[in-house]
Every structure is written in structure tokens, then in C-alpha cells.
Amino acid sequence: MRKTKRKTATAKRSTKKKPRAKSLAKAKAREAQEQQREFDVEEYIKGKIEELNKGLLFSPEWVGSTLSMIAPENAEWLPTTQAQVLKIDNFLSKEECENIIKVCTPHLRPSTITSGEADFRTSKTSDMASMPSPEEIKTTVDLDVKICNAMNIHPLHAEGTQFQYYQAGEFFKPHTDFFEPGTAEYEEHAKDLGQRTWTFMIFLNEPEQGGETEFMNIRNATIVPKVGMALAWNNLNQDGTVNRDTLHQGKMVSKGHKAIVTKWFRDKRPV
């Protein structure tokens, strides 16, 4: 009986080696698949670049006035002469919005500002250009190409797209997106890349209450979040000077949460 037990035990130990070998093979297969996906990402990016509009604005010294008479397809201009502000309904589908939220929320960090008090902006941010996985890269590239084609501005004039997430009680106090000329802020952030021109923002969901974007100096210019709707405005006047009537705020989310993406364009490009 003892011999039989020893043989049985030996047989059991020997059969455990096969699953280990299979696991090793599976791990190598997964590694190969991952490498293939990374290769495919590179090819995907190259293909998406080909989808950029031909003749995108590409001047090294482009200024905001260049876009004074160019409107994206299906754009609705706000009825004001104080600033160039437009909306585009259904710029993204509900599914596209949900996917962006899914891939960006794991990378949230506290939002920052270039000047002001610590509680000036209480949201969280994900830097989409820094997200590493193939799915995240694909989502970012798709979005960037779509925005740049809509605005007719080359990606080299753009900052990396940001995802922003506001929980109930969070807000962004009244501010402007341009860098104040003649200040240390301008020297640090705009000397090389130039001034911010257009802001392009997309609402990804609808808070249960609050979270509107309000332009403080423009009458009837409070925009209620709507899934997939884009909101864009020129931070400059037609002569290239800063437009202080673009002062705006992200009102407090009273109930639920708010998710948006924002892309800023510059009047120069890297050289």
C-alpha cells in the first residue's frame, strides 16, 4: 500500500509540469500579441495622420484672426459681437463619450492652474497624450484628428488634450484661458509656443444639476452641458490682442458629476 501511494504521489507531481509549460507558452504568446499591438498602434497613428484635412493652417506665425471667417460644419454661433463663441451639437456620439470617460478616469490627478489660489480649480485631470495603452492611444489620436479637422488647425498648433472630471461640489472659478501678456506667466508658458488662440471643449455627460459653463461678460451665454456637444471660443480679438470678454467659469456641480475634454490651440508651432 505504501508503494502504491508513493507511485501515485510521484505521478501527480509529474503531471503538474505540463500546466507550467502551457502557462509559459501562453505568457510568451501574450507578450507577442502585446508587441504586435504596439506595432499596430504605430501603423494606426500613421494612418490617422493621413486623415487630416488637406491645407490645414500651418503658418509658424498663425494668429487667431486667421479663423475669423472659418466655421466648423454644423456650428451654431452665439449671437454676440463680443467674442467668437460657437457650439456643435452631437460632435461626439454617446458611445464615444463613454469610451473617453472609461479610458481617462484611471489616470486622474489634481487639476492645476498657472496662477491663482489653491482652491481656484477643484477638478481632476487626465493628460490624454500621456496615456500608454493601445486603446488609450487610439482614443486620443481619434479625438485629436477629429478636433483639428473640425477647427481646420494643424495638430502642431495644439496642446495635448486634457480630460477633466468634476465631482459634486467642485468648480472652476472665473478665469481666462489666454496667458496675460507682459507677465511671468506669459514668459513661462507662451514665449516659445505663443499665445493661446482657440479653446475647444466637449461635454461628455450631463450632470444632474449644475456644471454649466458661463461667460461672465456676455449676455445669455450660459451653456448647459449636453452629451457630445462641443463648445469653442477664440481667446483673441481679430487683431490678435487678448479678448477679456472670454472670461468664463465652470459653475459648481451641485449633483452628480461632470466630465469634459479640452484642447487649446496656440498662435505658433514648435520649431
Image (tube, rainbow, N blue to C red):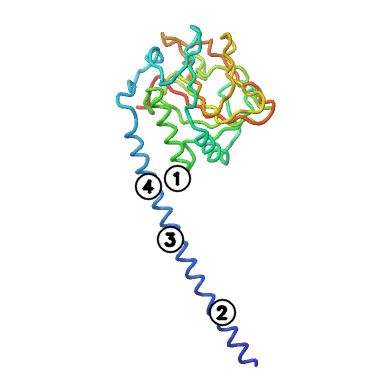
* Distance Cα–Cα, label 1 vs label 2: 40 Å
Label 2 crowd (10 A; few <14 / some 14-19 / many >=20): few
Give the labeled residue for mark 4.
40
* Distance Cα–Cα, label 1 vs label 4: 9 Å
Q: Residue furthest top?
A: 81
Q: Earlier in the sequence, mark 2 or mark 3?
A: 2
Contact between marks 4 and 3 (CB within 8 A): the answer is no
* Distance Cα–Cα, label 2 vs label 3: 26 Å
Q: Residue at x 50, y 8 (%)?
A: 80
Label 1 crowd (10 A; few <14 / some 14-19 / many >=20): some
Give the labeled residue for mark 1.
134
Image vertical order of residue 61 relative to residue 33, above or below:
above
Label 4 crowd (10 A; few <14 / some 14-19 / many >=20): few
Q: Residue furthest left?
A: 55
Dot 1 falls on a residue whose secondary structure is: helix
Q: Residue at x 49, y 74 (%)?
A: 18
Q: Quadrant of the C terminus?
A: top left
Q: Please, what is the three-letter code of the amino acid marked with disc 4?
A: Asp
Q: Please, what is the three-letter code of the amino acid marked with disc 3?
A: Ala
Q: Please, what is the three-letter code of the amino acid marked with disc 1?
A: Pro
Which numbered marker is on residue 29?
3
Dot 4 falls on a residue whose secondary structure is: helix
Q: Residue at x 57, y 41 (%)?
A: 106
Q: Looking at the image, which is closer to me, 4 or 87?
A: 87
Count the marks. Answer: 4
* Distance Cα–Cα, label 4 vs label 3: 16 Å
Q: Please, what is the three-letter code of the amino acid marked with disc 2?
A: Arg
Dot 2 falls on a residue whose secondary structure is: helix
Q: Earlier in the sequence, mark 3 or mark 1?
A: 3
Q: Looking at the image, which is closer to me, 190 or 234?
A: 234
Give the labeled residue for mark 2.
13
